[in-house]
Image (spheres, grey):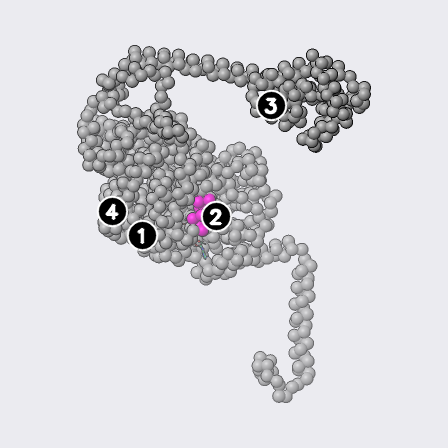
Amino acid sequence: MGGTGRHVGGGDPDPDPDPVLNFLRWKKNYNRRKNKLRLQRKEQQRPAGVVEREGISLLEKRYPEINPNEIKRFSDFPLSKKTLKGLQEAQYRMVTEIQRQTIGLALQGKDVLGAAKTGSGKTLAFIVPALERLYRQQWTSIDGLGVLIISPTRELAYQTFEVLRKVGKNHDFSAGLIIGGKDLKKEVNKIHYVNMLICTPGRLLQHMDETSYFHASDLQMLILDEADRILDMGFTDTMNAIIENLPKKRQTLLFSATQTKSVKDLARLSLKDPEYVWVHEKAKFSTPATLDQNYVVCGLQQKINMLYSFLRSHLNKKSIVFYASCKEVQYLFRVFCRLRPGIPILALHGKQPQMKRMEVYNNFVRKKSAVLFATDVAARGLDFPAVNWVIQFDCPEDANTYIHRVGRTARYKEGGEALLVLLPSEEGGMVHQLSQRKVPVNKIKINPEKLVDIQKKMQSFLAQDKELKERAQMCFVSYLRSVYLMKNKEVFDVFKLPLAEYAHSLGLAVEPRVRFLQKAQKQLSVNESLEGKSHPEGTGQCEDACSLVSNEEVEERGTHFKEKISTVQRMKGEGRKEEPEEKELPSQVIDKEGDESEELSEEEEVPSINKIPKAESINFLADDDDDFRDLDLLTVKRQNVFGLEAKDLAVLNTSNSELKKKATKTKEAKKILKRKFKVNTKIVFTEDGELVQQWPPVQKSRVDSEEKEDESGGINLDKAKERLQEEDKFDKEVYRKKIKEKHREKRLREKAERRKASRTSEKEGVEAFLDYSGNEEEFDPSTLPDPDKYRGSDQEADLDTEDNDGELEEKNGTRKRSKSSNNAAEESPLRRKKAKLSDEHSFVPLDTGLSLAEDEELVLHLLNSQK
Ligand SMILES: Nc1ncnc2c1ncn2[C@@H]1O[C@H](COP(=O)(O)OP(=O)(O)OP(=O)(O)O)[C@@H](O)[C@H]1O
């Protein structure tokens, strides 16, 4: 047997073949192959459903044996062929740590609370078990909603939807994306077919409330992505309401890069005996190892210069710049587009319409080098490929926000760099927080020689463009409000900020007045005097902030409010909260912001500056753009004083602030009058070289004597009244003349019409006559049209214009008659007939067919008969 075995394995020609043994061996192999084929054929004949069910039960049998430590690839998990194929096609083979540790638990049907660093692959960690869950249940479209995935932002929901589409494409389930800013009606029609729904909380609850056939009674799995962010955005009540609408018997997965207390509260509410998987709990750092993190300390007034200088020196990189508020993004995006740093600039924030947001998102994904100005709407979960730099222009609210922001770079084994810009007042507190959260940041310094000063340029932009200036003012207020509303007063103290310098750095000549800040300051001083400074900083101020800034204003802040929002809402007794980005998008804004485009083309969308009622005191009431809404918080002390230097302005400001007396409008008007300002005039030349004053419009009623106006300054009311009355008279006279002229024109028009009508009838008469005159011998001169009649009409025509006649001549073809009224009257009917007959040869001399003498006789006869 040993020798035989050797021969079989070796495959060398047997030196001493035993034919019987050979035959037996061949027969054995043959039978084995035959049986295998028979079985395969049998398998193929069985219904696919049965085979699938058997496959599923085989997979399920392997679930209890899943050992995360042995798993390296997705194929090591007992996954369906369809899912594995999808993963393979999307180039996902090796599992990441969070996937290795959570997929098995989720397949076993456990509730999971998973946390792992940014960019570590949490999305697949919940998408794979979700697909498998429905596959196991043999879910079909008629079964309705099986999996619900809730994301905090629309972009993240969209991104998750795309991953699901990619990985689940071999399955037969239907998937839907339900986010705010889209057509609700269209969603209503489709929602009941959807098996896997990805949505934002506000919109989901809206469907739960309003869409009659939307129900989640058979829901198998609930997934909360970036759950802490959902709660931070003030969706606690919404989430509670959603969870109440879901069946109790379901599996729940909850994922985030950071875990807060509120998440644990939510987990207690929505998860049953969950498995906590905190992959990097024991890691040295809570940010990716491939991320290089630095911070600079920079004065508020230098931040924009610094950013510009940074971008100029990183033209071939892909960067994201995070700001605290939408209005900062809007303003600085516009300004930087005008400054043309040499790199495409994009802006993403919650005030853009959804389509625009998608467009920007996709654009930035595609770009190799670009800079994205964004609010924290882009801070979580978004997976932009190959981002080199994350710059935090404004200090993040806390270490968690910091971690999510920097997580937009250095994703899945890639490298990346992060730069945090801190004010001197923010440095201590923030750096301490970061070190506590195991975030390694190095301090670096700005090279002052490399700093480009763009302040003057910005000032000139603002001097030319009122709308931009308003945006600068809104940016100013918005930033201050964001700082004011921050909870951690160790880091954020709005009263320490150099306001005037900040305003100048935005290009503003004068710092706008911020009412809420003034009120807060007052309140603070009252509190201090009452309590003898016993009030601990940080708590009292925040509460004041909540009461001083309306809820709407809070939402405009976009992202940073956390519990404060909930406090305000609870205080106001609101049941639940809509998604902030939806609230921030009134239709008008959608139109306006929808045009906000990538680079340098945004100038077209500049709204009319006529909207501004006054320069002295800007008070935007019901403006189209909700950007203008919060300007009621703001009053500009003085405008257009760019001639002044910053130093002078500072002196001016201090002296102004020292002046406690409130100047009335009358006083200010008087002051202006004393200065004897003259209105600018615009004079143009006509083609004849005459001078015409275009602006201000010249008073037509003015007589020379009035030029000698009272030069003593001020307005003489009596004189002004007289002048107005005179102007009124003059206008009335002009009006009367205009009406007269109109009537005359009307009369002439009617006459012309009448004349035309009579000529037509004349033509008809001629033709009738010609038709009739078949026989010259039977010619009856009495049938001739009355020549007086012609004359009359022609006389009228003569009163009008000669051109008119010429026109009629050509049009009617009655050339001879119209050339000269007399000729027309004298022309013989016979000639007319000939003329008609020889229409095409109208310039050929007419031949009556009679002799010359006979012709003359006929003419004389006709003339006599006319007389
Ligand atoms: N197993 C894998 N193999 C290869 N690439 C992967 C794998 N898992 C995830 N990725 C890639 O890693 C990147 C980050 O994944 P993902 O967006 O899921 O991270 P995340 O943990 O959700 O990040 P964040 O906390 O920022 O939301 C994505 O580009 C994804 O395609």
**Comparing labels 4 and 3, the label whose residue is closer to the camera:** 3
| Circle 4: element type | strand
Crowd rating for badge 2 (residues with CA inside 10 Å; few <14, some 14–19, many 20+): many
What's the mark number on residue 297?
4
The answer for how far apart the CA atoms under marks 4 and 3 are is 88 Å
Q: Three-letter amino acid code at disc 4? A: Val
From which residue to which does the magenta span run? 359-366
Q: Three-letter amino acid code at disc 2? A: Thr
Q: Quadrant of the C terminus?
A: top right
Question: Does 694 sit left or right of 215 as displayed?
Answer: left
**Comparing labels 4 and 1, the label whose residue is closer to the camera:** 1
Q: Three-letter amino acid code at disc 1? A: Ser
**Comparing labels 4 and 2, the label whose residue is closer to the camera:** 4
Q: Earlier in the sequence, mark 4 or mark 3?
A: 4
Residue 23 magenta-highlighted: no
Q: Is residue 127 above or below residue 300?
A: below
**Comparing labels 1 and 2, the label whose residue is closer to the camera:** 1
Which residue is found at the position 66% from the left and 24% from the top?
816
Q: Earlier in the sequence, mark 4 or mark 2?
A: 2
The answer for how far apart the CA atoms under marks 4 and 2 are is 37 Å
**Comparing labels 3 and 1, the label whose residue is closer to the camera:** 3
Residue position for label 2: 160
Which residue is found at the position 68% from the left and 83% from the top?
20
Which residue is found at the position 54% from the left and 46% from the top?
175
Crowd rating for badge 1 (residues with CA inside 10 Å; few <14, some 14–19, many 20+): few
Q: Are marks 4 and 2 in contact (CB under 8 Å)?
A: no
